[in-house]
């Protein structure tokens, strides 16, 4: 009996708590309301370290031993896309690599991956933050690559070209700009190939309109003050090489299509149906990181020997 009394007295000395066990006594010793006490407790889901650990765990489990644990790859790609929105931490590189790897390695999920990439690029908020401060830029570049590489797996849409030429493209890194431009060329030529199969006067007018609008938009993506009369060669010369070369190539493709479709006809110009084959001569397939090491060295080849005479060291002169 005495022990029970002592136990009750000990409990009476403990600070009051709410239903979840949180103390109702502030750091200053004052009582607070249950609602206020709950509001002061940090939510672990808002902790960046916790969020990063959760995202990394999801990615590690899903990609373990080349997707050994996965049976539904559409779910996996959809989950990656969801993480683009809700991760709340910088996992841009990891998400971009996983999106690309799934699309390249898993043939059956490519149509879904391409549709998902189109959806990401259609989100003005995602594109806006990527071009504003670089947040998620690698993931958006990966989406651009996937859409450009596998666009033939979806119904062709000329709107894809506009998605790949966003207003803030010039703010991205050079390699990302080049990726967007290359993908824009592929989606444009893929769309041309598609519409050439059911050519008509209406289709001809649409091709003329889309080609002209793209010609006007292309230089403005990098030089907002440019117009149709601007010298494309001079403008391109101011850009990094990997961007400049693709910009010139796209400009020449648009110019050639404009000339070829200058007059309506009963059938599409052969160029419209054939241009996309420039980008699809060889199919892109995954290559093992150790593949080169498995190639036997030809007999008589010394990889350590100089190809030519050694370059003289002039640093001591």
Image (tube, rainbow, N blue to C red):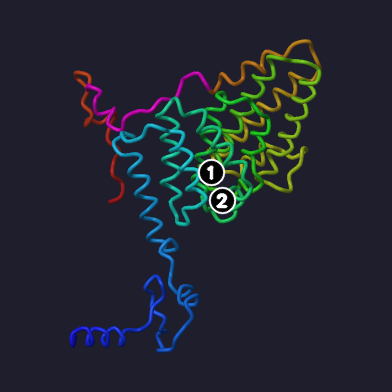
What is the secondary structure assignment of the residue under circle 1?
helix
Q: Quadrant of the N terminus?
A: bottom left
**What main secondary structure does the magenta stretch of the protein show?**
loop
Image position of 41 with respect to 50: above or below: below
Image position of 122 with respect to 287: above or below: below
Report, in whole angstroms, how far the alpha carbon at label 1 lies from the one at label 2: 7 Å
Place of residue 266 in the rendered image (x, y in percent of width and height, measured from the top left): 78, 10
Seen as rendered, the residue at the extreme top is 266
Q: Earlier in the sequence, mark 1 or mark 2?
A: 2
Using residue 69 as the reference point, say whether residue 153 is left or right of it: right
Q: Which residue bears the numbered disc 1?
A: 140
Boundaries of the magenta span: 280-297
**Residue at figure coordinates x 37%, y 45% from the top left:** 59
Q: Nearer the viewer, residue 22 or 273?
A: 22
Place of residue 293 in the rendered image (x, y in percent of width and height, measured from the top left): 24, 29
Q: Is residue 110 magenta?
A: no
**Residue at figure coordinates x 45%, y 63% from the top left:** 46
Place of residue 52 in the rendered image (x, y in percent of width and height, measured from the top left): 39, 56
**Residue at figure coordinates x 33%, y 44% from the top left:** 60
Q: Please say if the residues under marks 1 and 2 sit with CB atoms less than 8 Å apart.
A: yes
Q: Quadrant of residue 218?
A: top right
Place of residue 226 in the rendered image (x, y in percent of width and height, measured from the top left): 73, 44
Q: Which residue bears the numbered disc 2?
A: 130
Q: Nearer the viewer, residue 81 or 310?
A: 81
Q: Quadrant of residue 4?
A: bottom left
């Amino acid at each position: 009996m005495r022990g029970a009394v002592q136990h009750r007295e000990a409990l009476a000395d403990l600070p009051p708590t709410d239903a979840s066990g949180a103390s109702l006594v502030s750091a200053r010793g004052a009582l607070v309301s249950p609602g206020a006490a709950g509001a002061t407790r940090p939510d672990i889901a808002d902790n960046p370290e916790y969020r990063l650990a959760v995202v990394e765990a999801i990615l590690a489990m899903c990609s373990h031993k080349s997707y050994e644990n996965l049976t539904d790859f559409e779910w996996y790609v959809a989950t990656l896309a969801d993480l683009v929105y809700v991760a709340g931490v910088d996992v841009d590189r990891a998400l971009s690599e996983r999106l690309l790897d799934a699309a390249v390695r898993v043939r059956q999920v490519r149509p879904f991956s391409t549709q998902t990439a189109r959806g990401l690029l259609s989100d003005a908020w995602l594109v806006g933050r990527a071009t504003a401060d670089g947040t998620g830029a690698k993931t958006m570049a990966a989406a651009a690559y996937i859409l450009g590489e596998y666009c033939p797996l979806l119904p062709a849409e000329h709107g894809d070209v506009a998605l790949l030429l966003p207003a803030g493209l010039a703010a991205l890194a050079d390699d990302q700009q080049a990726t967007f431009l290359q993908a824009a060329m592929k989606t444009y030529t893929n769309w041309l190939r598609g519409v050439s199969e059911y050519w008509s006067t209406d289709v001809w007018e649409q091709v003329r309109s889309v080609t002209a609008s793209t010609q006007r938009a292309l230089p403005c993506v990098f030089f907002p003050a440019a117009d149709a009369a601007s010298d494309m060669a001079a403008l391109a010369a101011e850009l990094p090489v990997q961007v400049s070369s693709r910009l010139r190539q796209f400009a020449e493709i648009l110019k050639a299509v404009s000339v070829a479709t200058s007059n309506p006809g009963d059938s599409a110009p052969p160029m419209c149906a054939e241009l996309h084959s420039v980008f699809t001569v060889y199919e892109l397939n995954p290559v093992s990181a150790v593949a080169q090491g498995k190639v036997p060295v030809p007999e008589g080849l010394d990889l350590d020997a100089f190809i030519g005479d050694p370059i003289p060291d002039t640093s001591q002169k």
